[in-house]
Amino acid sequence: MLMRHPTQNAIAPFELWESGVRSYCRAMPAVFQRALAAEIWDESGNRYIDFWSACGSLNYGHNHPKLKAAVIEYLTGDGVINSLDLHTCAKRAFIETFAVSILMPRGFDYVLQFTGPTGTNAVEAAIKLARKIKGRPDVVAFTNAFHGMSLGSLALTGNRNARMSSAALLNHVVRLPYDGYDGAGITELERFATMVRDPSAGLPQPAAIIVETVQGEGGLNVASTLWLQCLARIARQLDALLIVDEVQTGCGRTGPFFSFERAGIQPDMVCLAKSLSGFGLPMSLVLIKREHDVWEPGEHNGTFRGNNLAFITATAALNLWTGNKLMPAAIGLHRRVDDWCEAMTAKYPARSKGLGAMRGLAFDDERIASAIAQEAYSRGILLECCGPNDEVLKLMPPLNIEDNVLDEGLEKLEAAVTAVMERGTHNSVRKKRGSGLGKVNAPALCQI
Ligand code: PMP
């Protein structure tokens, strides 16, 4: 069944009053009303299967019953909602749970810094601290990196469209090729280290190196464990701090709680956000190796560092991990999505990309992925595209999606792929308003 499109009246208030900066709603214009687990309904009663998870911020699905119950109980008891960084019972419970269920079993000695509530706030805090510790301004970031939209993070982000409006202000970043970028690998990292050591090579000594172990917005590029280990070693040798941006990869998206665990490395700082609260409530965190916690009181302040409702749901979400039911379910999901991607690459000219529950298909013709996403939307599947030209169809279902819903979603998605490939023309690519950037599909879709 094809979805009914919203009437012009239904979306008029958004079009009339909301800024032109809005992006996802252009490709998925329904007016959504209700959501449960991996399903979401619009106000006309159309049902969609969610392979998007609000860009990785709903790893446990919509309105998880245990998290919802915790919210209701807290609100019913008139729990404190915002308290900046005052001590609260909700915050203490989160800290203790995080320490006991995540840090201690891994032997990690990080302190927790609660930053402003979004991913970019965590990244800003991490690079500011690194610059303070090392007394040097430059930070290494990689091709196709995405670290956020505020100035410091944007300087680290590779995407030209995102950088354009602030280009003149985006400085003190050294850009290196990510693993696999145009064939680059460990050799390029080693050469960079040699150049930094060479007093006449003209390269600054960086304060930090920031990396995503899988590039979510950049096209589901996966760094090898060897490359990550080499990066960690080079950071140490250059006396630069290693920051892993786990905003999208964290909270089990690639398998273990932290995506860097597969490489056996221990970053100096880790940025977490998106699925940390588990419920879609804004919450961010920087993990800082204890010896690097040199902040003065109030040196990186902010009003919304005490979202107690998010602490409540985040604690309940961590308890899903300690119950250990999540991992087996997620591994089942990895296998099914992996099989599906392999089946698609056997049939069509596509490459399978990504890791764990962060998977996708890359198409050489960059219009195809967007056309499939649009076709899938019309068949009741929410998902987005990523990569520098939106050439990768990105599947990020909730980690605990029910098998039957996953199968139904994959079937519908396959039908959308087949429809677009058989049509042969990609004339139904997603439209983006007035970009003038020479792209017909919506690059802004990939920026959050
Ligand atoms: N880092 C990464 C790896 C991300 O994927 C994102 C968002 N897509 C951010 C940082 C920025 O997070 P936010 O949109 O919450 O500021």
Image: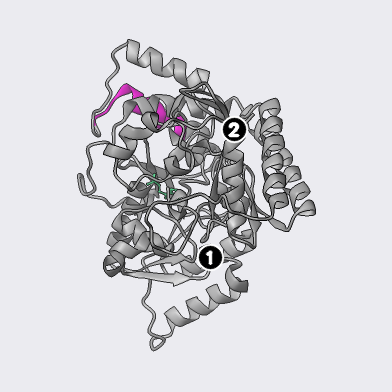
Q: Mark 2 points at which residue?
A: 380
Element type where label 1 sits in the image: helix
**119 left or right, relative to 260:** left
Relative image position of residue 67 (x, y in whole percent): 47, 21
Q: Name the residue under label 1.
A: 231
**Disc count in the image?**
2
Screen quadrant of the N terminus? top right
Magenta run includes residue 95: yes
The residue at the far left in this view is 298
The residue at the far front in this view is 8
Front in this rendered view, residue 353 or 228: 353
Relative image position of residue 334 (x, y in whole percent): 68, 40
Magenta run includes residue 376: no
Relative image position of residue 241 (x, y in whole percent): 41, 61
**288 left or right, relative to 391:** left
Mark 2 surroundings: few (<14), some (14-19) or many (≥20) residues within 10 A: many
Q: Tell me which residue sits at (23%, 41%) in the image.
A: 302
Disc 1 residue type? Leu
Relative image position of residue 292 (x, y in whole percent): 35, 54
* In the image, residue 272 above or below residue 191: above
**413 left or right, relative to 135:** right
Is residue 367 at least partly visible in the picture?
A: yes
Mark 1 surroundings: few (<14), some (14-19) or many (≥20) residues within 10 A: many
Which range of residues does the magenta coloring cover?
86-98
Q: Tell me which residue sits at (62%, 50%) in the image.
A: 262
For the residues labelled 1 and 2, the Cα–Cα distance comes to 42 Å
Answer whether labels 1 and 2 touch (C-beta < 8 Å): no
The type of colouring in the image is: one colour
The residue at the far bottom in this view is 200
Is residue 184 at least partly visible in the picture?
A: no
Element type where label 2 sits in the image: loop
Disc 2 residue type? Gly
